[in-house]
Amino acid sequence: MIRAENIVKEFNGNLVLKGISAEFYPGKTNLIIGRSGAGKTVFLKTLVGLNQPTSGKIWYGNTDLFSLDKKALRKIRMEVGMLFQGSALFDSLTTEQNIRFPLDMFTNMTKKEKIDRVNYCLARVNLENANNKYPSELSGGMQKRVGIARAIVLEPKYLFCDEPNSGLDPKTSILIDELIKSITVENNITTIINTHDMNSVMEIGDNIVFLHNGLVEWNGNKSQVLGSNNELLQEFIFASPFLRRLRDAARKL
Amino acid sequence: MFRNFFFHFGRYVQMLKLSLGKPEKFYMYWNEMLRMMNDIGIGSLVIVILISVFIGAVTAIQFAYQLGGQLIPKYYIGYVVRDMTIIELAPTITGLVLAGKVGSNIAAEVGAMRQKEHIDAMEIMGVNTAGYIVLPKILAALVVIPMLVAIAAFVGIVGGYLSSVPTGWLTSTDYVKGLHEFFLPRNVSMMYVKATVFAFILTSVSCYQGYYVKGGNIELGEASTRAVVYSNILILLSDYVIAVLLTG
């Protein structure tokens, strides 16, 4: 489990996170949602340790992330996988080399073991036979899947996804969501997804943290969204008239 | 202004300190170093040779022209070309050229890695990014650039020969005699000291500019330009300091 405790983050006098406390559970897809500028990315980067909070604590299980020395932090980091918004695949490396990078860097596996592990991860994201393709030869959806394969290659306990659906068509978005969900459940990973994709909210939102103006405005799950009386949440989720009509129809049922 | 200078200097030293951390896997660093040695060494060989041959040639012709009808032996042309090339022209001009070619390339490459979140991705994996990205580049430059400078010196001397002997300014025997006269081996040491210092400056400054880049493409271009400008200034400054220290 990951727990954020009263996280405050300030950039040059600008308070972006104003005291966020939230819990993220293993085996569940935990979503951070909110409008652009609500502090989602800053919060995610703080959770993963890329940003040092101005005050507050991040707990990975019983370990305070920001009290660790370099060696202990590196050990925790090896239990973390992250899918970036732009996939962050290394352009000069093939798909196989990209996925193998963490194995090369941190394990003493033989070459065959590494290739087997890479092939397993590629099969897991339905990308068999893409080993020798470069990132520039892959579509956006395929790049995301390679990003997921690289994130899970070291069998992480924690998986972070920064807007995994951005730039993808709805069908591919659903495939990516389903993939993240199934990997999370299979491996009992604590998965935290930063998104403003409404399909994701309604399909895989096991635990949803809605941020507004640097604070947690609402916390619940996908089945509680419809019945919530929080106006800001309703405005955010059902922003379009079409979705509002759908919501009203669903409520009548 | 001073605050800004100390901020950047402190961060630069911090980056270098971080880059000296223990490698996670030695062979990954080694592979990266080999890639950079190829990029810097083989990739810059043609331009270094081209520039050096012309610099040697021009030095010889201009010195011969200045000698005119004076009572200075003609073989001095070979002597002057040799010492000018070894002590000053080969290391400094090669350093300045490489600051432009290699320095801007390094700043752009590292800066693009920062912008595309490659560095963040490595950080999250637990990689010491300063170590993996910066250290192999510096080490590769420290190995390859002195070699390039030695080649530049040799080619410069050959350039001097080609421009002065076939054109009749002096005989081959005179030129070769000049090359042998008043030779001080420590001048070659000075050349290597300069080459090593310049290699360190141009790679570390360029890595720094790229590693901490913020913003978009315009900022990346600016970082690349700063890498070249600051490297050039520091190369010229250190050239002066080394000259004072080693000839005093």
Image: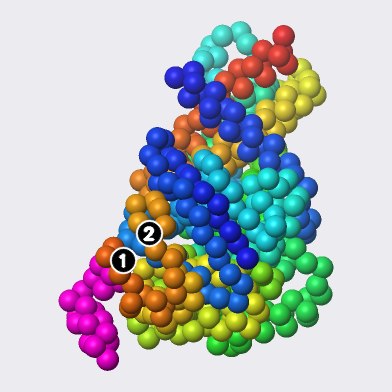
Residue visible at 55% across and 63% down in the picture: A23
* Residue closest to the eye, A205 or A173: A205
Q: CA distance from mark 1 to mark 2?
A: 8 Å
Q: Is residue B228 above or below residue A80?
A: above
> Please, what is the three-letter code of the amino acid marked with disc 1?
Asn
Relative to B42, is A135 on the left or the right?
Answer: left
What residue is pinned by disc 2?
A217
Rendering coords of residue B113 (x, y %): 52, 54
Q: Name the residue carrying label 1.
A: A230
Between A11 and B187, the residue placed more toward the observer is A11
Q: Quadrant of residue A55?
A: top right
Q: Taking B229 as reference, is A236 left or right?
A: left
Q: Nearer the viewer, residue B123 or A130?
A: B123
Quarter of the image that includes the C terminus of chain B: top right
| Residue B98 shows up from this direction | no
**Residue range (magenta):** A234-253
Q: Is residue B79 magenta?
A: no
* Amino acid type shown at disc 2: Glu
Are the residues at dot 1 and dot 2 in contact (C-beta closer than 8 Å)? yes
